[in-house]
Image (cartoon, rainbow, N blue to C red):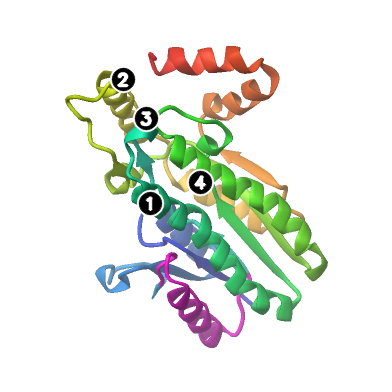
């Protein structure tokens, strides 16, 4: 029997690539979108879900279970980017980012756990970010929301281990997707003390995404994890130097690592 997979944020980018790849491997894939009708040519089923709306979450999961009779794998992929000097990002945008990147995934997890407990099996994969391992300039809020999900996963997986439900994090680096177009950008203000350094960093970030790896690399990594009997706690997927930056943070003194980042971003 094919495993039933639910991917939040499955209409574009990494989520779409994962869904198409898993479908080609015989999985019964459901993706989510706030407006699934906009994607009539999707190669797998799309259901309506807004991670900031708990009623929407519960309806989507109920629809998947009623259609397929079970839910074997949840991939918490829906997320949003945010950039800007922390001093200048409006509070409502900070809260909105955490709603999408942190509280949303937690609420989806809470909503699938009863079904997975009933099955006595399940796998939950949280898509975080290599940026979640370090506080990056002008991406501090994004780093914080993804880092929070990394840490809560460590606790969550121990709490659910007695139910034969597995949980893991997958932290991607830069991939060639449309995340830059969809992220919230604090405007570059003419009278801002951060104007020059923020503009330079913003241009650098967009260039990294544009030249990023093919999201199919993430799809293949997710497939391998699903096929693994006992997944690890953390996975990193991306360019060597992006993954190596996490190693450097572990072994270098804090101020030396900070100096490397400041030099990289020309701060």
Earlier-in-chain disc, 4 versus 1:
1
Residue bearing mark 1? 13
Give coordinates of residue 113: x percent, y percent: 66, 72
For the magenta stretch, what is the residue range?
A: 49-72
Earlier-in-chain disc, 2 versus 3:
2
Q: Which residue is drawn at 23% across and 36% down?
A: 187
Taking depth in this image into account, of 27 and 134 the one nearest to the observer is: 134
Question: Mark 4 to mark 1: distance in Å?
Answer: 19 Å
Quarter residue 210 falls in = top left
- Asked whether residue 7 is drawn in magenta, I would say no
Q: Residue 154 carries which label?
A: none
Residue bearing mark 3? 208
Question: Which-is-in-front pick, marks 1 and 2?
Answer: 2
Q: What element carries label 4?
A: helix
Taking depth in this image into account, of 175 and 233 the one nearest to the observer is: 233
Question: Which-is-in-front pick, marks 4 and 1?
Answer: 4
Question: Mark 3 to mark 4: distance in Å?
Answer: 20 Å
Q: Residue 197 carries which label?
A: 2
Tags 4 and 2 touching, CB below 8 Å: no
């Amino acid at each position: 029997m094919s495993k039933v997979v639910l991917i939040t944020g499955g209409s574009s980018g990494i989520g779409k690539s994962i869904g198409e790849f898993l479908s080609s491997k015989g999985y019964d894939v459901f993706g989510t979108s706030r407006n699934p009708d906009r994607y009539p040519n999707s190669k797998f089923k799309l259901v309506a879900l807004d991670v900031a709306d708990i009623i929407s979450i519960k309806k989507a999961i109920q629809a998947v279970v009623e259609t397929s009779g079970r839910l074997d794998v949840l991939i918490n992929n829906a997320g949003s980017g945010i950039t800007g000097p922390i001093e200048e990002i409006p509070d409502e945008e900070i809260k909105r980012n955490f709603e999408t990147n942190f509280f949303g995934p937690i609420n989806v997890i809470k909503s699938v756990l009863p079904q997975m407990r009933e099955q006595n099996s399940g796998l939950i994969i949280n898509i975080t970010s290599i940026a979640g391992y370090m506080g990056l300039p002008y991406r501090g809020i994004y780093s914080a929301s993804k880092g929070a999900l990394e840490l809560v996963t460590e606790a969550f997986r121990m709490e659910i281990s007695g139910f034969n439900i597995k949980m893991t994090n997958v932290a991607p680096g830069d991939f060639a997707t449309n995340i830059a177009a969809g992220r919230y950008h604090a405007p570059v203000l003419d009278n801002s003390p951060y104007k020059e350094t923020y503009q330079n960093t913003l241009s650098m970030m967009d260039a990294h995404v544009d030249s990023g790896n093919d999201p199919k690399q993430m799809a293949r990594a997710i497939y391998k994890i699903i096929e693994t009997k006992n997944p690890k706690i953390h996975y990193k997927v991306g360019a060597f130097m992006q993954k190596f930056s996490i190693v450097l943070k572990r072994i270098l003194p804090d101020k030396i690592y900070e100096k490397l980042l400041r030099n990289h971003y020309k701060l």
